[in-house]
Amino acid sequence: MKRMINFKPAPAFNVMLGLLPFVLLVMAYVVGSDARLELNPNDKLLPGFEQIGAAIDRMAFEPNKRSGDYLLWVDTASSLTRLSLGVLIAAVLGLVVGMLTGALPLVGAGLSPLLTVTSLIPPLALLPVLFIVFGLGELSKVVLIAIGITPFIARDIQRRTLEIPSEQLVKAQTLGANTSQILIRVLLPQLMPRLIDAVRLSLGAGWLFLIAAEAIAATDGLGYRIFLVRRYMSMDVILPYVAWITLLAFMFDQALAWINTRLYPWNAQGGRS
Amino acid sequence: MKRLIILTLSLLLSSNALARDNFKICWSIYVGWMPWAYGAEQGIVKKWADKYDIEIDVVQINDYIESINQYTSGQFDACTMTNMDALTIPAAGGVDSTALVVGDFSNGNDGVVLKGADSLAAIKGQNVNLVELSVSHYLLARGLDTVGLSERDITVVNTSDADMVAVYGTDDVTAVTTWNPLLNEILSVPNSHKVFDSSQVPGEIIDLLVVNTETLKENPKLGKALTGAWYEIMAIMSAAGDEGITARTAMAEASATDLAGYDAQLASTEMFYTPAAALDLTTSKKLVSTMQNVAEFSFKHGLLGDGADNAGFIGIETPAGTYGNTGNVKLRFDPTYMQMAADGKL
């Protein structure tokens, strides 16, 4: 008898299997939504696709009655600005700190314990402190994201730096390279694809911090909108926003993966062989 | 599969219109609702439920909005909320709701605070931190009216109530609108001035016990038991001497303050200790115009739903007349049970 671990679905069947849970989820939602709407046509908990469609239309394609803005796009723009800034700062800081602590034992001895300790602080617990130090504006939201993911990226890069075979460093030195040349010509190129991977992994946490910060004090943003309409249980707005955030996160992730293979094809090939 | 889901859901929906003898009500921490905590703890609610041969579960929900959402989705038969939230959450969500007990109105418990300025007109051009779309927002809009300003003259920054006190300490927060106990906490910061409060619009922010209309119609016992229990608790907490002090101390402790702090909040709350006092407000013409103000504010902020084409889209029935669409009444102020309490017929 063929063992379970050797059963491989045919390509077409593979796709179907992958879609099945989504179809089941949507079906369960439709049934539940219909049952509730039958009892109360104004039910807000499980809106039908018609109501959701109308809400999307209202949020994305019609100017808001009071401000004249297209809310979804305004929210998306401000959230993405905050997220990108935060992640960019975290990536640069993480790369510099990670590489230096990994490559220079002197710096490593001085900063590694601090890095370990800071990476263990739950950033959300720091939020009230951040608000008091950086105010309620954009700064504190960006800082929260940066603080939240920098330690993770820095520790990851530090790890990766230490993994680079010492033979390479010895060889570079016998060819006459000085410290900064080794850092920039030997280590940095090898760390860049790892940095992109680390950023991909930390994006989930980035979104979490972004939405948490927007929920507490904001005038726009995806997280702001969700927590605002929660006040009157507008699931017809919340569900599309959640789906939109998921899609944005997915696109970010795929874009970074694509950049990684385009810029550093040798890394992807190395990984495959 | 489909049948199973429908069955499970209909079991979950406690708003099914059958005579039952098992009910759940929810409340959240607020000065005007602490009596429910006391009544549940002291067995007063149980005593009245037993009298009418039903069971009533009194459940505390930590988050106010969550409690209303739970009620609206049918998890509870009754819940404590303000008149504005009763209109914009359950009523706008198609859940026909009845204000069974009109408990009190905010008489200074909600206020607008400015840093370094002592007149409301100075708010022009400032960022105002508040819980957007809440009664604070409504109060601010009412306040702005009185000085000839509108919401366009300020910027509203949605700020979680849990963080209101903390953010008030930062330099870039210069104006807030909030409720007690946060209000008193914020006013204790030097150079803070209360420039407008709910005592200037008395009787407009009303705290209610709201019951699902259908459930109430099928089960008048529930209305009688809850109303009876409420006025027994009212009599105890307003009693002079030790009895009242003991009751208020218990309520104070349940809301994480002390007797002095709780009494201070009560001072800025117009509690209706007797059914007659509650009926005065409930049957007045003023209630209709208050609800009109609330409905207009809600409509302007899109809280009445997409289908709403004017502020009167959802009918609000009061003893003195109905505001808005009489064909779509979803919020009712029903004096029947309070009247029974006043007549001693419970």
Image: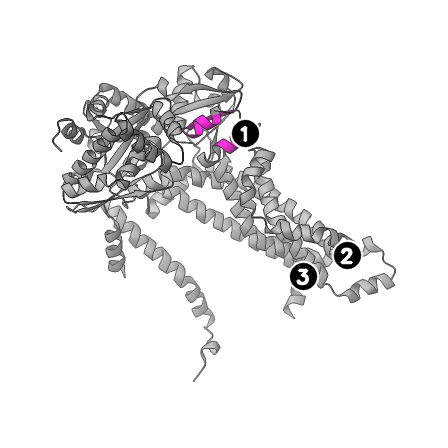
Image quarter where the N terminus of chain B lies is: bottom left
Residue A140 position in % (x across, y down): 58, 37
The circle on residue B169 is 1
A154 above or below B84? below
Residue B304 position in % (x across, y down): 32, 33
Q: Is residue A100 left or right of residue B169?
A: right
In the picture as drawn, the residue positioned furthest to the front comes out as: B242
The circle on residue A105 is 2
Q: Is residue B264 left or right of residue B275?
A: right
Q: Check disc 2 and give the amino acid type.
A: Pro
Labels 3 and 2: the sequence-earlier one:
2
Q: Quadrant of residue A16?
A: bottom left
Instruction: Check if mark 1 and mark 3 are on a common chain.
Output: no
Q: Residues within 10 Å of mark 2 (few under 14, many from 20)?
A: few
Judged from the image, the secondary structure of the residue bearing numbered disc 1 is loop
What chain letter is assigned to the residue under label 2?
A
The circle on residue A265 is 3
Residue B168 falls inside the magenta stretch:
yes
Q: Select label 3 or label 2 by which is in front.
A: 2
